[in-house]
Image (cartoon, helix red, strand yellow):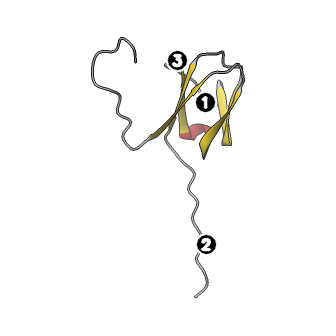
Amino acid sequence: MAGYVGRGIEYGNAVAAHFTGNGGATYALSYDTVSNGVVVSLDGVVQKNGTDFNVTGTSLVFTSTVSSPLAIQVIYTGLTLTFPTPADN
């Protein structure tokens, strides 16, 4: 954060991912989640889920292309959990 004076941003237990816009609309996420399970920002401007972007599984799809070199930040707030099925007996 060039020009920022103060403590660094703490995300707690939330996982964050950072990308750089490349002129495309689709980006691969590291975790399987849904649109309501992430907070997405472009150069610090928070985007509205369902309007500006959608998430299906591990695909983040913007409704328009993201110009290079815009910074994309994804904060995972709700990850999909997979529980194994217990064996019989």
The dot on residue 85 is 2
Q: Is residue 25 left or right of residue 41?
A: right
Give the labeled residue for mark 3. 43
Circle 2: element type: loop
Q: Is residue 9 left or right of residue 33?
A: left
Which is more N-terminal, label 1 or label 2? 1
Q: Indicate the amino acid at tag 3.
A: Asp
Decide which of 47, 13 is in the foreground and name it: 13
**Cβ atoms at labels 3 and 2 below 8 Å apart:** no
Circle 3: element type: loop
Give the labeled residue for mark 1. 49
**Cβ atoms at labels 2 and 1 below 8 Å apart:** no
- Check the picture and name the quadrant holding the N terminus: top left
Q: Residue furthest left?
A: 6
Q: Indicate the amino acid at tag 2.
A: Thr
- Check the picture and name the quadrant holding the C terminus: bottom right
**x%, y% of residue 34?**
62, 42
